[in-house]
Amino acid sequence: ELRDRDGKPVRMAGTPVRALFEAAGALDPPPMDAPLPPVLAGWLVIRDWDRAEAYHRQHEAELPETLAALRHAVTAYPASPRLASFLVILEVTQRAEGLAAASAARLAPTATTVLELEPRFDPERSGPVPATFVYDYLKLHGRSRKERFPMEGLLWQLMQAGELTHAQVAALVRTAAKTPTDRANATVFTMMIELAELDDAAVVQDPQESERIKAILSKLGQVTASRGPANLKNPDCVDPVDRAAWVPRLDEHKAHQNSLETGPGDARAGLTELVAHFLANC
């Protein structure tokens, strides 16, 4: 399998045939830069997240020293969410003051059905997010939506609690997305992030008049509406499991926004209501 420098597959062959090498030669070369520390390079080439965690444990003392080099690499390759996910792991490890022991209890979701809402995360009671949670989330790559949605409910609450930044969550959901329905759910995450990052002046504008808000909501339309002149079901539509899981999340989020008792808070709640409406019509 031949991948480009962002890790995207570009060509496959059963054996290393001539055409594969010719395709490799046609790829854009990476920009010239200082070489990565060997211990970091050895980690970044691992495709399996179980093996990546094992490598992290083996090199736990050395990898934190490569944080600056990894940040530089992420800046140089902004289109690679996988690279950014390695950075999330190191940043979370740093904040937690180390990688949790392999024998330690793993942070896991409480809500395991779509009728349940994952409780708000309390860092004072639970402590900082362990990097093992990030590994466990990334290991869900390729699993069914039914298996994945509980962890994404927890991921959402970690973001709401400020334990993971918007950029960190965006990188993780994009890295873990494999199928069209995975990517549709990632779109809901990233679209909610974009709405949250609107300043008060922008958020109080009429959603039907604001080009900025319309551009954000149009991304949601791509994964919730019918497609084509025959009004066929959109093949990239959000999975019914995810739609059901998002309803209580958005209801709670809207209630929190309304509790702010400010004009911007009401406007933000209105946008959340719009998102819920779009999801209900997929």
Image (tube, rainbow, N blue to C red):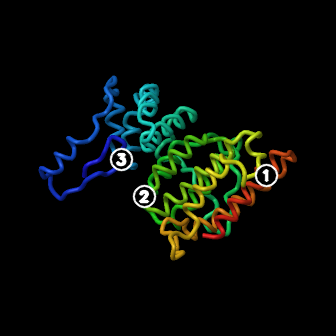
Label 3, residues with CA under 10 Å away: few <14, some 14-19, many ≥20: few
Identified by mark 3, the residue type is: Arg
Q: Secondary structure at mark 2?
A: loop
Query: Camera-side residue: 20 or 40?
Result: 20
**Residue depicted at x 46% and y 25%:** 68
Q: CA distance from mark 3 to mark 1?
A: 40 Å
- Position of residue 142 measured from the top left corner of the image (x, y, whole percent): 42, 60
- The type of residue carrying mark 2 is Lys
- Between 207 and 174, the residue placed more toward the observer is 207
Q: Which mark is residue 247?
A: none
Horizontal arrangement in the rendering, residue 112 relative to residue 3 (left or right): right
- Which badge, 1 or 2, is on the more N-terminal residue? 2
160 sits left or right of 34 in the view: right
> Rounded to the nearest whole Å, what is the CA distance between mark 1 and mark 2?
32 Å
Mark 2 → mark 3, Cα distance in angstroms: 19 Å
| N-term-proximal mark, 2 vs 3 | 3
Q: Secondary structure at mark 3?
A: helix
Query: Which percent across, then down, holds residue 55?
Result: 36, 40
First in sequence: mark 3 vs mark 1: 3
x, y percent for residue 154: 61, 54
Q: Which residue is mark 1?
A: 256
Q: Nearer the viewer, residue 120 or 101?
A: 120
Q: Quadrant of the C terminus?
A: bottom right
Which disc is residue 178 wearing? 2
